[in-house]
Image (spheres, rainbow, N blue to C red):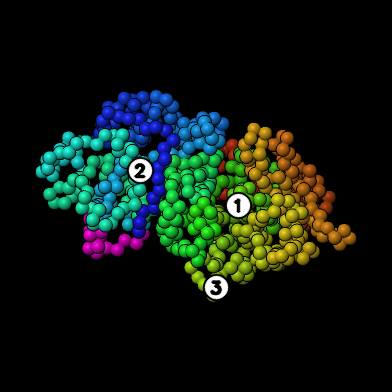
Amino acid sequence: MGSLSANINLPFQPEELDEEDDIYSNYESSALYRMLPANAKEYVAHSPHLLEYLQMFPVNIHGIPLFFSELKRELKGLENPNVIYPVNEFTFIHIFSDPEDVRNYYIPIEPSFMHSVSDAMPLIEKKLIDLIDVLEEDPITEEERREVLKRVLKEVIYIKKPDENIAMLTGEAETGKTGFKDKIVKFLNTDFTAQKETGELAGSKISQTPDGKVILSMAEYRSIEYLLIRDKIEMGILNPFLADTYNEDITCDGVGPIFVEHKIFKGLKSAVEFKYSEEIDEFVIKMAERIKRPITYKNPIVDATLPDGSRINIVYGTEISKHGSNFTIRKFAEDPPSILALIEWKTTDYMVAGYLWICIEFGMSLFMSGETASGKTTSLNALTSFIAPESKIVTIEDTPELQVPHKNWTRQVSKGKGKGEGDGGDITMFDLLRAALRQRPNYILVGEIRGSEGAVAFGAMQTGHPVMSTFHAASVEKLIQRLCSDPINIPMTHVDNLNLVIIQSAVRRPDGSTVRRMLSINELVGYDPETGGFSFVSMFVWNPVTDEFDFPGKGSSYLLENKIGTLLGIPDNKKSEMYFEVEKRAKILQRLHKAGYMGFWDLYHMMTKVKKQGLLKIEF
């Protein structure tokens, strides 16, 4: 399979060096290395290519970047960032300020960054193909393919020692050295797509030993090994973007740079860009093949899931995208934010969480509603920890995004058009929802209600199966309008089977930052035949002035007093004490927060222990 490649456009003039030092064997002798902080020296010791990048970066103008092993939210206020942090064993990200633009630069630093190996790559690939063709083993998993590729690469490469003379190795006269600046310029103009034509190999000046091994420096060898695995097995130039846990969205709008939405530094433009529409067309075709979802002019739109679980949308061709093919990736978080993380971010607070904990534990149906990119799925994921730990849960999605900490979890994904099947092979969310009702779940979670599956979801609620889902509506009124209109068509009198609606939004604060807030938590009361309207009560409301949550519904909760209170057999004169239960749960969450149980899985396990110890038992 061909390489997934693009171009590098650095936002600064690379420093010119008189000669190329052997960084890999003698990095400690570098004057710049001695100036680095201790953590940066540790990174360089393992990844010398980082020092090569720093030697090229004009530190005399911009200063040595700040090095962080992890990024804290306090860095959000950094006005002119010059920050480097690792995203995996070999790759670093440089966040670099652009004084001319609101978007700063996002520069991936990879082992291949400083070493143009395009001359050697075609010859090495040809030798590798000859070796792999005679292999008896058939690697299946990605890890097996990586190991095979590394092993056969060592058989076709000779790594030159720093003091070895190429003329001695080849028996030929040594040619003049290539300047360091020339290498940089050559790299920046290089497309790493390997050329297979033997005619192009004939003119190559790549040095070989008498037995045919390609002679490379250690730096070039590491660069070749990294590029082969990155481009042949993994996701090519997208690897650094996907490996970065701080990225939320990765977008390419066509010709131009790849953009990222970063959790700390917000909107950034990368140094990786496509110069021509043909480049990005070829890139998205290969990327679609890589994820086994071929894209064509007849089928130019693909929604799919990447191997790491991230969600990708690809639009191919200039007929429907005038700037050329484009793609958007919504990153998948292996460890989704917990409800305590949401509280720390002020998306919600302890009292709201305590109230929702009771409602969800006792089987209330809930919709998380809001506009696009308001954080609905993130919040819904966090709320799954409140489902009773002994519950059986079924999730139904068209693209898998929901994370559930419970062990008894059935995950079902629809299979529709564009997923490699014809109409006869389609399995819709409607089909999966009907099937779920036969599986006797305690909770059904639907990725998003937007069509005929809404009617089945409400049917499930009527038969006592609580449902949680996301929904696109910016207010309770608009949500009810959409539910009662095409294509969902729920009768107005049935809407109150849905107990709770949380309205969430991305709001702009006075300091200009955009934050996600639960604007209101609402109980749906019922249809009023006299007025023809639908009544609901806002239990909690976000106050934009104080950035805190008011509790106007205290003392008037239909769910706490009538639904859950009646379910527990609490006498009428004691139902008001349910509000003390909300406070109790809020305090439990506060204690768990102070004890450091911030992680999604850790918090769930501690909440399970709290329940097992009888601390959640409601007694009156």
Which numbered dot is residue 189? 2
**Residue that sits furthest to the right in the current view:** 530
Amino acid type, mark 3: Asp
Mark 1: give few (<14), some (14-19) or many (20+) Cα within 10 Å.
many
Q: Where residue 452 sits: x, y (%)?
A: 66, 67
Q: Residue at x 61, y 45 (%)?
A: 339
Q: Earlier in the sequence, mark 3 or mark 1?
A: 1
Which tag is nearer the camera, tag 3 or tag 1? 3
- Which span of residues is magenta-colored? 127-141
Residue 200 falls left or right of residue 589:
left
Secondary structure category for the residue under label 2: loop
Q: Is residue 136 magenta?
A: yes
Front in this rendered view, residue 245 or 498: 245
Q: Is residue 245 magenta?
A: no
Kindly tell me whether residue 611 is visible in this rendering: no
Please determine whether, in this image, residue 419 is positioned above or below residue 34. below
Which residue is identified by label 3? 423
Q: Residue at x 51, y 62 (%)?
A: 300
Amino acid type, mark 2: Asn
Q: Where residue 535 sits: x, y (%)?
A: 81, 55
Q: Quadrant of residue 345?
A: top right
Front in this rendered view, residue 111 or 591: 111
Front in this rendered view, residue 482 or 71: 482
Amino acid type, mark 1: Thr
Q: Earlier in the sequence, mark 2 or mark 1?
A: 2
Secondary structure category for the residue under label 3: helix
- Please give the count of numbered marks on the rendered protein: 3
Which numbered dot is residue 70? none
**Label 2, label 1: how far apart the Cα atoms are:** 41 Å
Which residue is identified by label 1? 377
Q: Residue at x 47, y 39 (%)?
A: 106
**Label 3, label 2: how far apart the Cα atoms are:** 46 Å
